[in-house]
Image (cartoon, rainbow, N blue to C red):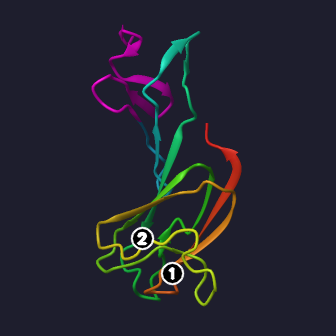
């Protein structure tokens, strides 16, 4: 059982299956969720104002979800079987998507469609080098197409629902 000191938990606390929280006043608490294979990674950040009430965690604001999209190795080739993984992603308003370039060449993540007129109006990563990341928080609902301006055959889609993560 975790110890409670000054209204803060000082040891890891299991919140639900496969999710563990580390809560301490000296670090920013984070919950790591271990997703199934081939699913996007998810990280839930917990505000530091956590208290325990009636065996439930009460927080001052909703959890913020960060979801990862991988830019697959070999994405610069049109014959590659995968480009953005996952290529279609369903999230909630307020969630943050983090794209990581796992390829060996430069890529971009730019809202819109190749040949469209509203390129980069929602988000535009500029160049993402190998091993680097770009992130964007989606604050409005809708369907957001995106692509790589250097390799326009690379496309993806983010579907943002009205319900904010909790």
Give how far across and how far down residue 151 sits, in percent: 45, 86
Q: Tell me the residue at 46%/51% (across/down).
A: 41
- Pointer 1 local density, CA inside 10 Å: few below 14, some 14–19, many at least 20: many
Give how far across and how far down residue 40 sits, in percent: 49, 55
Residue 71: which disc? 2
Residue 16: which disc? none
Q: Tell me the residue at 46%/31% (across/down).
A: 47
Does the magenta run of residues contain 83?
Answer: no
- Asked if labels 2 and 1 touch by Cβ distance under 8 angstroms, the answer is yes
| Lateral position of residue 78 relative to residue 160, left or right | left
| Lateral position of residue 75 relative to residue 53, left or right | left
Residues at marks 1 and 2, CA–CA distance in whole angstroms: 9 Å
Secondary structure of residue under mark 1: loop
Q: Tell me the residue at 46%/32% (across/down).
A: 46
Give how far across and how far down residue 55 sits, in percent: 55, 12
| Quadrant showing the C terminus | top right
Residue under pointer 1: 154
| Lateral position of residue 61 relative to residue 80, left or right | right
| Quadrant showing the N terminus | top left
Q: Tell me the residue at 46%/88% (across/down).
A: 79
- Pointer 2 local density, CA inside 10 Å: few below 14, some 14–19, many at least 20: many
Magenta range: 1-30
Secondary structure of residue under mark 2: strand
| Lateral position of residue 65 relative to residue 139, left or right | left
């Amino acid at each position: 059982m975790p110890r409670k000191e000054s209204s803060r938990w000082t040891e890891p606390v299991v919140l639900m299956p496969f999710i563990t929280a580390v809560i301490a006043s000296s670090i920013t608490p984070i919950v790591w969720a271990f997703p199934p294979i081939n699913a996007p990674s998810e990280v839930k950040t917990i505000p530091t104002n956590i208290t325990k009430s009636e065996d439930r965690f009460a927080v001052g604001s909703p959890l913020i979800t960060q979801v990862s999209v991988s830019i697959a190795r070999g994405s610069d080739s049109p014959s590659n079987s995968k480009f953005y993984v996952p290529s279609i992603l369903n999230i909630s308003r307020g969630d943050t998507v983090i794209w990581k370039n796992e390829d060996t060449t430069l890529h971009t993540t730019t809202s819109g469609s190749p040949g469209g007129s509203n390129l980069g109006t929602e988000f535009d990563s500029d160049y993402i080098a190998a091993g680097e990341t770009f992130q964007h928080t989606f604050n409005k609902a809708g369907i957001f197409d995106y692509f790589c301006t250097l390799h326009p055959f690379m496309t993806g889609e983010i579907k943002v629902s009205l319900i904010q993560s909790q």
